[in-house]
Amino acid sequence: MYFSRVHEFRCVLALSACLLSCGRAHEPHAATSRDDAAARSPAALSQSPSASRESAHVARRSSGATQTAIYTASERQAPEQLASCPDEMVPVRGYCIDRYEAYVVELDDQDREHPHSPYTSVDGLRVRAKVAAGVVPQGYISQVQAESACRNAGKRLCTAAEFSLACRGPDPKASYPYGGKQRKPGKCNEGKGSAVSVIFGAAANYGSSQLNDPRLNQWPGGLAKTGAYAESESPFGVFDLVGNLHEWSAEVNANGHGNFRGGFYGDAEVNGSGCDYVTKAHSSNYHDYSTGFRCCRDARSESE
């Protein structure tokens, strides 16, 4: 009897020790699993004048897992730090940027919206910037007009730094939204040459009238609809920052000239490569068929 009780007592002790030991052995694995799940969650991610004169919502949005691979741990945002942006914008380190190049609508005296052709200028009109996938973006617009269109949408033009970061992504050495410093033809809508020579041929004089002709952005294979080039998507999920249309940024130089960036469908290399492309040769009131824009705004916290 005594031996049986001692044996039973020893078995209980051995079982208890095993349970405690096994529990400690599995704790690190359990903690790692919790951290991995949090990292995978969506909440954890978030010149010359002559040269410059010629210069669907796509279903391929990156999954949370893909975004985790793109950003390092230090670049992910905790849920309470996530920026709050409208649906048509993307949060990028404290600011929001339009996912696509802008189109515009005309505003009447009662602030009602009316359609506007993206192939004509907005001279003398009050317009508002709008954003959508699969539409023709607005060309023929000046920096002054673009800034007004953004302001009428509760936004503003992007700064040079905001454009650059949204275009190249977390890698400061990249020159293209698809990464690296090597141009890869066909990924962005660029490299197609002068639309003026396509439309006017030997009669091309590159004067203001010809440069603003509505036909220039309507020839097949020229200007593309927003988001049509899926591989132009930047690591932050922004399309067409390189190519399609030049995009006015907010800066005005001491000589009164504005800057437009990223190149257009004719060229995105002459005045810098891809994300580094910038033209400074024109006044803030200048526009031609190649000049477009998109808007930015300051991000708001979830609590605001």
Image (spheres, grey):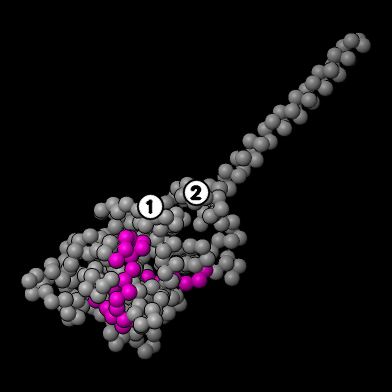
- The residue labelled by disc 1 is 179
Q: Whole-percent x and y of residue 215?
A: 16, 73
Q: Amino acid at mark 1?
A: Gly
Q: Position of residue 53 (x, y in %)?
A: 23, 73
When asked about the image quadrant of residue 76, the answer is: bottom right
For this view, does 75 lie left or right of residue 210?
right
Residue 43 in sight from this viewpoint: no
- Choose top left, top right, bottom left or bottom right for residue 169: bottom left
Circles 1, 2 touching at the beta carbon (< 8 Å): no
Could you say which is closer to the camera, residue 241 or residue 91?
A: 241
Image point (29%, 78%), residue name: 282
Residue drawn at x 36%, y 82% as measured from the top left: 255
- Residue, far left: 202
Q: Is residue 187 above or below residue 163?
A: above
Quadrant of residue 36 within the rendered picture: top right
Q: Which residue is mark 2?
A: 68
Gap in Å between the C-alphas at discs 1 and 2?
A: 16 Å
Please, what is the three-letter code of the amino acid marked with disc 2?
A: Thr
In the rendered image, the residue lying farthest to the bottom is: 109
Q: Which residues are magenta?
A: 271-299
State the quadrant of the C terminus: bottom right
Q: Is residue 118 magenta?
A: no
Horizontal placement of 219 versus 159: left or right?
Answer: left
User: Which numbered marker is on residue 242?
Assistant: none
As displayed, is residue 287 above or below residue 173? below
Q: Name the residue rendered at 46%, 55% in the picture.
A: 170
Q: Is residue 280 magenta?
A: yes
Is 167 positioned to the left or the right of 10 in the image? left
Residue located 41% across and 80% down the image:
152
Q: Residue furthest right?
A: 2
Q: Measured from the top left, where is residue 273 in percent x and y?
A: 32, 60
